[in-house]
Image (cartoon, coloured by chain):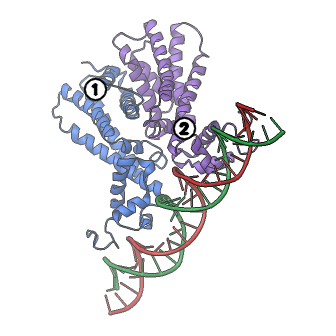
Chain colours: A blue, B purple, C red, D green
Amino acid sequence: MTTARARSHYHHGDLESALISTARKLVRQDGAEHLSLRQVSQEIGVSPSAAYHYFPDRTSLLSGLGFSLFEELADFQEKEISKIAGNSARAARERFRALGRTYFHWAKKEPHLFNLMFGDFCSLEKSPQNQREENRAFINLTKCLDELYEFNLISDKMRPYGELLSWSVVHGATSLIIGGHLEVEDFETTLDAVELALGIKG
Amino acid sequence: MTTARARSHYHHGDLESALISTARKLVRQDGAEHLSLRQVSQEIGVSPSAAYHYFPDRTSLLSGLGFSLFEELADFQEKEISKIAGNSARAARERFRALGRTYFHWAKKEPHLFNLMFGDFCSLEKSPQNQREENRAFINLTKCLDELYEFNLISDKMRPYGELLSWSVVHGATSLIIGGHLEVEDFETTLDAVELALGIKG
DNA sequence: GTATTATCTGTACAGTGTTCAGATAAGGGG
DNA sequence: CCCCTTATCTGAACACTGTACAGATAATAC
């Protein structure tokens, strides 16, 4: 019976995802470097060594969490973009801006989780699963840029730099702002800068 | 006598900077999260509690190191830029590119140190000293952009976005490439993208 | 109902950050 | 020269950590 939970603590039923979601809660609060496996176990009500049946070590739990966060971010972005309907140039531009805006808003809301995703933990072992999730975000970006290109809002010369430029600006500004290294009164300024950079006619 | 060193281990003479440089060496190798105060102390040949006369806790040592790294990066950038002499438009463009290139090269060479600077450790407590060092890098960027503007290589409309755009692209691309999230065959492509984004006429 | 298997416990070990009373050495004033 | 003050470092201690491993427990298959 894999759906039962909390019957006794033996055979928890869904320990792997319980570990990840509890880790998520703790990293969200205190940052990745303060995550303790023992605290995670205790919160679930399970012995400290139970986790080792699902993750070989603490680092693996953190990268497991990190990969699930890429999925979470992609979900969040897709949900927001799907709110903007229409096949107009105006809608295409709005979707493109929304893509950047949601990236920033998510990171601003969850700085510790964002830092985990792009810190040391998720860079080393690039599992196939991870790449798939990251590709999802990248494909969404490409889709938006293609749309802009079809509406002739972006030039032939600039199109090849589209992904590099927009992801780098949005990620870079987000990362710098969250870290307190750069101050911008409103992230819309950054989105304006991206549009200007790509030469999107307004 | 404050210049003496290693007479005995009592009164080391320069323990504070020894702590930072040893921490630098260890973080460089294994990343910030694996830095242990006890290992730093042992390497210097000093008791584990000696560090607490200079840093209130482990985190403070890490941010102390981080701040010194901003200085190191700025030094490196200034050294490279000063190699490019001349008051021509061509030289101004080369200096601007060199600014981005050195940023990337430094980070590529020292990924763990780079991650420390822009991770959780150096974002919390923004000491006045820290801001001064970061400002040095920012002022260098502004100087380069002003030069480009004087040579009429960058438009009135784009100039206000100069710092935001160039720093964000270079930092963002660097961070993504180092983390393995983005692949570029050559960073010069990114520098091309920045010039295109700013509309620098080539 | 018994055997098998996956899952979790308990105990143990080495290493960690941090505290604090006390040892040590340097420098200043007689 | 010696004493005394002060900064500096030691040593032992505490609570906590990640991790390993032998054994207990419960679900599953026959």
In which quadrant will I find the C terminus of chain A?
A: top left
Element class at badge 1: helix
Element class at badge 2: helix
| Residue A109 pos. (x, y %) | 30, 40
**Relative horizontal placement of residue A152, taking residue B171 as reference (left or right):** left
Q: Which residue bears the numbered disc 1?
A: A188
In which quadrant will I find the N terminus of chain A?
A: bottom left
Q: Which residue bears the numbered disc 2?
A: B113
Q: Image quarter for residue A101? A: top left
| In this view, A149 is above or below B21 | above
Q: Nearer the viewer, residue B71 or B124?
A: B124
Q: Residue at x 54, y 44 (%)?
A: B31
Q: Residues within 10 Å of mark 1 (few under 14, many from 20)?
A: few
Q: Residues within 10 Å of mark 2 (few under 14, many from 20)?
A: many
- Is there any visible trace of residue B151 in the rendered image? no
**Relative horizontal placement of residue B148, taking residue A162 as reference (left or right):** right
- Three-letter amino acid code at disc 2? Leu
| Residue A3 pos. (x, y %) | 26, 68
Q: Which residue of the protein is positioned furthest toward the left in this rendering?
A: A86
| Residue B151 pos. (x, y %) | 46, 6
| In this view, A129 is above or below B114 | below
- Three-letter amino acid code at disc 1? Glu
**What chain is tagged by disc 2?**
B
**What chain is tagged by disc 1?**
A
**Relative horizontal placement of residue A181, taking residue B66 as reference (left or right):** left
Q: Nearer the viewer, residue A39 or D29?
A: A39
Report the disc number at residue B147.
none
Evaluate whether label 1 is on the same chain as label 2.
no
Q: Nearer the viewer, residue B91 or B24?
A: B24
